[in-house]
Image (tube, grey):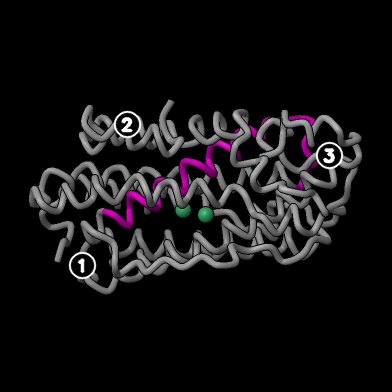
Amino acid sequence: MTTTTNLPRTAARSHQLVTASERTTLDPFREVDWSIPIDDSAFHLPPEVLPLYGTTVWDSMSETRRIVYGRHEAAALCGAGIWFENVLMQAVLRHLAELPVTDPAHRYLLVEVADECRHSTMFGEFIRRAGTPAYRPAHASLDVDELPGRRAMSYLLILAVEELLDHINRKTMRDERVHPVSRQIAKLHVLEEARHVSFAKTYLSEVWPQLAADERHAMAEAAPALVAMVAEFSIDPAVYEHLGIDDGATTARVNPHHRAVIVAGVSKLTGFLQDLGLIDDENRSTWAALGLLA
Ligand SMILES: [Fe+2]
Ligand SMILES: [Fe+2]
């Protein structure tokens, strides 16, 4: 069992993050102006992050059609967000079950779960108001108890999801072409996820050197495919089926523009894993072959 009694930096960071959460905890039903209709008056994601951007399919669409398509992609991203937050909460709850209540991380991790509950209600509200199908990863399953490296792998996965979403959210919140509701959602998520990213990085960098060599090896082996799975959720075939875009998912997967968005989106994660030593000269090519490193 890994408590934070042997993780002084994680314990100290937990105290800081509880204080930061007391200062800023946001209610999406106050912060987001849901009275503004989620319509096609503007893009819901910056066009450049849409998986079909720059393809011949994209070129053939009218501006109105592009906006409609983007509304569906935004709803699908919210659906993927809800799915991931559910899985990641399960991982955090398993960790919580191991921790004594006196461990400083105990209080912070409950705050983190509460944050994710609010985020998922916010993503759900967007989908309910967006007039799209209730998109969600259809055939996904991930057993958080079966991950190698135990808790450490959970936090690596948490970080992968959070960094990729953060990349898209930051572009969304700053983009004046984007609908105000989407910008408000993105901003709220960026503000609160910064704490989760901070916990995951502190925990991982402190636990990693304490793992047995075989555990580190198993994690380094499993990580590229798991992060690739996270990246794969940026494309939901149901969007293209619903909109009648033939071969949309295949077109998106091979779209060099989309592949560059993924590399950029996970670059904070891959940079961190290189500093940690999990990505090294030996396994770098595996990450590159999966489209996660340039
Ligand atoms: Fe979240
Ligand atoms: Fe999070």
Which residue range is magenta in the image?
Answer: 153-181
First in sequence: mark 2 vs mark 3: 3
First in sequence: mark 1 vs mark 2: 1
In this view, 283 is above or below 128: above
On the question of residue 36 being in view, the answer is no
| Depth order, front residue of 116/255 | 255
Of all residues, the one furthest to the bottom in this rendering is 97
Say which amino acid is labelled 1: Thr
> Within the image, what quadrant is residue 97 found in?
bottom left
Q: Nearer the viewer, mark 1 or mark 2?
A: 2
Q: Position of residue 18 (x, y in %)?
A: 37, 54
Count of picture labels: 3
Q: Is residue 156 magenta?
A: yes
Q: Is residue 4 magenta?
A: no
> Within the image, what quadrant is residue 171 found in?
top right
Q: Position of residue 148 (x, y in %)?
A: 23, 59
Q: Which residue is mark 3?
A: 66
Q: Position of residue 68 (x, y in %)?
A: 85, 47
The structure residue drawn at horizontal position 22% and vertical position 41%, both measured from the top left corner, is 205
Q: Which residue is mark 2?
A: 285
